[in-house]
Image: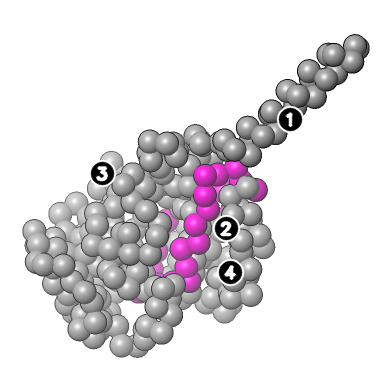
Amino acid sequence: MSKSIKWALGIVAVIAVAAAVLYPKLVVTLPPDGAQATPNTFKGTYGGRYTEMFQIGGNAITKDLAANVYNTWGLNGGDTTRDSAPAALLDKIDVKEMAKKFGMLAVYKNGPRLWTLDWIEVEMGKEVDFGGMKARWVNWLDLRGISTEPGAADYKNITVTRHTKFGFNKGTRISVLEDPQGNPWVMKSFSLITFPDQNFADIANLGSRLKLPAGWKFRSVVLEQDLVLTPDSTGTAHITQDNFGNTYDRAGGPFSNFKP
């Protein structure tokens, strides 16, 4: 090989490396980690600690983004401790390193959180190791127009695709947001992310601290019958968050067995 050819190939290699640094991958296809999902049932979940991990893909230029969501519940020793996202594992996760590891646009750590429901039926897919903390695929999330920055999802309607049933037993006290159209949203997840000083035992009085938009209401009620939250017939569910990061599922109509 002549010196001129070697020199040209060297220049090409340098340009390729520079391009990879200056122009990283901007379009990412999410892995099919839910393709082999199987049913799982968990009981006695109320107050249990967990975390969700998002693998975010899509088109970074057009902001047409989506996420695979992975949940730690049932893993990391949580069957015994009721803490499936222990701080020793959760706190050491470097989300930038995880994004590189999985070839994603980003990885987001959505936890720790506490369940506010009594039981779960969920289809779970591939188990993934996020730097020592394991989690299983549970759903696909539409992130178009939604940022993962704190507060970006407050009182917004977010679409989720999944096959789940979330159950609240008769006698359980539930927290309900009501939007301006009169739709109820039932809290399923209590956040310890942005406001770790939230008092889980004082959840019934949360309404006095919320910054509710005009037309929104908060109420705390004790169930007189079992409540079951479900996606609609297409597998579509809707979620929202309050300004403390607590997560609610839409109820009423096709989304629950009755309107609470």
Q: Separation of disc 3 and disc 4 at Cα? A: 35 Å
Callout 2 secondary element: helix
Q: Looking at the rendering, in which quadrant would you find the C terminus?
A: bottom left
Q: Nearer the viewer, mark 4 or mark 1?
A: 1
Residue 36 visible in the picture = no
Compare marks 3 and 4 and give the one earlier in the sequence: 4
Which residue matches tag 1?
14
Which residue matches tag 3?
233
Please state which amino acid type lies under the numbered disc 3: Ser
Residue 102 belongs to the span the image colors magenta: yes
Q: Residue at point 48% right, 47% down?
A: 56
Span highlighted in magenta in the image:
101-127
Q: Nearer the viewer, mark 2 or mark 3?
A: 2
Compare marks 1 and 2 and give the one earlier in the sequence: 1
Q: Residue at point 16% right, 67% down?
A: 213
* Nearest to the observer: residue 66 or residue 116: 66
Compare marks 2 and 4 and give the one earlier in the sequence: 4
Q: Separation of disc 1 and disc 2 at Cα? A: 28 Å
